[in-house]
Structures are given as structure tokens and as C-alpha cells.
Image: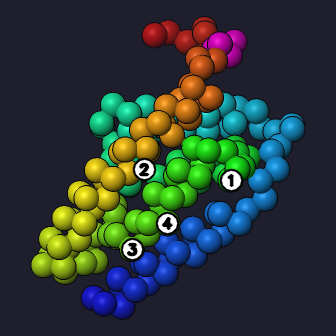
Amino acid sequence: MILAEIKAQSERLIWFVSATTQSTTTMKTWPNPDLRVKMERQVSALAASVIAGRAPVVHSTQRLQRLLFGLGVGREESFMQDLERISSSTLHLPLGAERQHWDPAALAGKDVEIANAEAWAREFGIDACRAIVKRFGAEKPPRDDESSRPG
């Protein structure tokens, strides 16, 4: 059980280090513009869910970072710095599928820590999510093939 916990923590740390050291240059031309639009919609929808309280800030932070790095958003953006602050402060917490590998008694203690981290992260994470929605949430006009589909 402990080995699984260590492995999960190591994988999250490896992801975090690799994600935060990626190049911050943005793609001027995307080979697949539809993919960019899809990623913009995903990041905007997730940020909107956090704002509305449908998704937890702490758990959503790493997914937001992955999407934003994929979109070429640099670490110098203030909302990226806020997401990095949340992520780096909560990497040790069992979130998502990782929780199944934890002992229930240990998990109960971590749940208190997760609740405290969530309250702390909401203080400034909501503003970061608002900035993300403002930047990526503008409705895109439907493509020709989408507008002809029946509703």
C-alpha cells in the first residue's frame, strides 16, 4: 500500500516538474486548429465549473495547467502563477484515482487537509479561473459542418 502511494506521488511530481519546465513559446500556427479550439473550450469549461463550484479548485488545477501549457500559455501569466502556487502546495494530497490506493484512515486525515487547501485555494484560484474564462471563453462561431447539424 505504501509503495503505491509513493509511486503515485512520484508520478505527480514528475508531471509537475516536466509541465512547469516546458517551453513557454506559443505556437503561431497550429497544425490542427480544431484541436486548439477544442482545448480552449475544455480549459474555459473547466475554469467555469470551478467558478460555479461544480469542480474543486485543488483537483482541477493540474488539469488546467496541462491544458494551458498545451495551448502555449507561459508561466509568466499571473493566472498561471496562481495555478502553480496551488499545485505546488497540494502535490502531496491524494486526489482523483490515486485515492483508491490509500488506507481509509490515512485518507480521512488527508480529507481534512484537502478541505483546508480548497478553502485557501478558492481565495485566489477563482480569480485565476475568471481570467482563464475571459481569455479563452469567448464563444467561437460554429464551423460550417457544425452549423448544419441538427440540434
Badge 3 element: loop
Is residue 108 toward the left or the right of residue 139 in the image? left
Badge 4 element: helix
- Of 91 and 67, nearer the camera is 91
Circle 1: residue type:
Arg
Badge 1 element: loop
How far apart are the two marked residues, 1 and 3, measured between alpha carbons? 21 Å
Q: Which numbered circle lies on residue 88?
A: 4
Q: In this rendering, is residue 78 above or below 17?
A: above
Q: Which numbered circle lies on residue 75?
A: 1
Decide which of tag 3 and tag 2 comes sooner along the chain. 2
- The reply to whether discs 3 and 2 touch (Cβ–Cβ < 8 Å) is no
Q: Which numbered circle lies on residue 60?
A: 2
How far apart are the two marked residues, 4 and 3, measured between alpha carbons? 9 Å
- The reply to whether discs 2 and 1 touch (Cβ–Cβ < 8 Å) is no
Q: Tell me, yes or no, if residue 45 can be seen here.
A: no
The spot of residue 148 in percent (x, y) is 60, 8
Is residue 42 toward the left or the right of residue 115 in the image? right
The spot of residue 32 in percent (x, y) is 77, 38
Which stretch appears magenta? Answer: 141-145
Residue occupied by mark 3: 92
Q: Quadrant of the N terminus?
A: bottom left
Residue at image x 37%, y 44%?
Answer: 123
Q: In this rendering, is residue 118 above or below 32?
A: below
Decide which of tag 1 and tag 3 comes sooner along the chain. 1
